[in-house]
Amino acid sequence: MGVAAVNLRSWPMTVAFLLVLAAFVRLLAATDGDLDGVGAVLGLLVGLLALPPLTTVVWAAGGGSVYAAGVGVGLRLWYHQFASGRFVQVRALPFAVYLGGFGAADGRRPQTPFRVMLAFAAAIGAAGLATVALTTSGWLFGLGAAALICVTSFFADRRPVAPLPAALSEFEARSRARLTSVVLAVQRREDAEVVRMTADVPAVPGHWTDSYLLALRAGALEETATATDAVHTLRTALTGPEDAMTPLVRTCLAIALFRAVLRGEIASEHHASVVAEIRERAARNADFARSMELAEVLAVQTAYLDGDWPRAIAHSRRAARRQPPGHRAEAYAIAALAAAANGDRSRAARYLKAARRNNPAARLVQVAATVLETPDRSDGSTALETPTSA
């Protein structure tokens, strides 16, 4: 139930491979070596392609919450967030049919969808195991092998959104259940509502869902309060023990620091140390950022801080294209600032227009408008050079 990189335990997959290999040897012996190899390959491909979408249907039918859906082949995933619209993500799996959801839908028992998923996986796994053990048909063997591989990966999943922990623990299930409603509010850009919904999240996370909610809260605080409020929230969160979402908190801290600098919320005497921290955090979190579609955002920051305006513009445009409608304003605003700093006022005006069209209330859009529409700032000096108090 996620598009981040798959993280599997190796030993269950090894056991599944050995079982399929042993069944394959038995099948060769049972057919005197006259195996329908083409049928086996086709059965394997059909099974691998059919089971993921079937699993998503079972999740939704079993009461799982859904905030997005996607389908993709190769490196592109056509993705639809139900509260904000369609866009394209990259670095998808070779084939993906995806429903985004964390826990139970409103009105459903927290553990119900997870238990439904586990029951479905157990049934498919048992059927696959029986098929590869008993069949003499290459086609059916391929289907059974695909079922066994998919189900084993399901149980071997180590990501925080893996179903097994929530099926066994009501606390885990309840912790996840509140995530989708907050994510939907983020998609709608209801920042004040996000702040309200996350008001009771502990400042120091006790669970990975707390870290995730604090990262979302920080993003909303950047718009409803100040970027330095977001920075404080994220720094406090990082004082606790690490969990699966700690890398996201670190990445969001780099983003919040950069926005605080652009918005003139950092005192001039602290600029050098803050810029150094932004660079260091962007470098440390590069791998995680790629898995969360944030790599271009960090690349924008690095290019901007380097004064490489053409590269900052290019990364800003790519970052905007990978965000859903309503969430592209910040990237276009940074492109406008970079174009202004590069002396291209007409191009900067076009990016500012795109940012306003996307979300005119975004704080960085207001910063870009101030820079571009103030005569003595039209050279793109930007808030990076504006000494203000924190």
Image: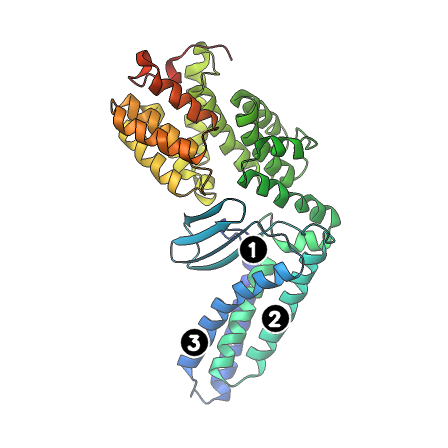
Assess disc 1: are there few (<14), some (14-19) or many (≥20) residues with their C-alpha within 10 Å of its C-alpha.
few
Hey, which quadrant is residue 282 in on the image?
top left
Report the quarter where the N terminus lies: bottom right
Which residue in the structure is indicated by mark 1?
Answer: 9
Q: Note whether 87 is above or below 289 in the view shown.
A: below
Q: Say left or right for 242 vs 341.
A: right
Which residue in the structure is indicated by mark 3?
Answer: 42
Residue drawn at x 29%, y 32% is 311
In the rendered structure, which amino acid carries the disc numbered 2? Ile
* Separation of residues labelled 1 and 3 (CA atoms): 27 Å
Q: Is residue 300 visible?
A: no
**Could you tell me residue 139's position as x and y percent?**
47, 81
Which numbered dot is residue 382?
none
Q: Is residue 245 visible?
A: yes
Which residue in the structure is indicated by mark 2?
Answer: 124
* Separation of residues labelled 2 and 3 (CA atoms): 19 Å
**Could you tell me residue 292's position as x and y percent?**
48, 43
Q: Note whether 244 is above or below 147 in the view shown.
A: above
Residue drawn at x 51%, y 70% is 146
Q: How is the image coloured?
A: rainbow
Q: Secondary structure at mark 1?
A: loop
**Could you tell me residue 180's position as x and y percent?**
62, 45
Contact, mark 1 vs mark 3 (Cβ under 8 Å)? no
For the residue pair 221 and 5, the one nearer the viewer reads as 221
Q: Secondary structure at mark 3?
A: helix
Residue drawn at x 60%, y 30% is 192
Q: Residue farthest to the bottom? A: 32
In the rendered structure, which amino acid carries the disc numbered 1? Arg
For the residue pair 68 and 283, the one nearer the viewer reads as 68
For the residue pair 35 and 207, the one nearer the viewer reads as 207
Name the N-terminal-most of marks 1 and 3: 1
For the residue pair 135 and 55, the one nearer the viewer reads as 55
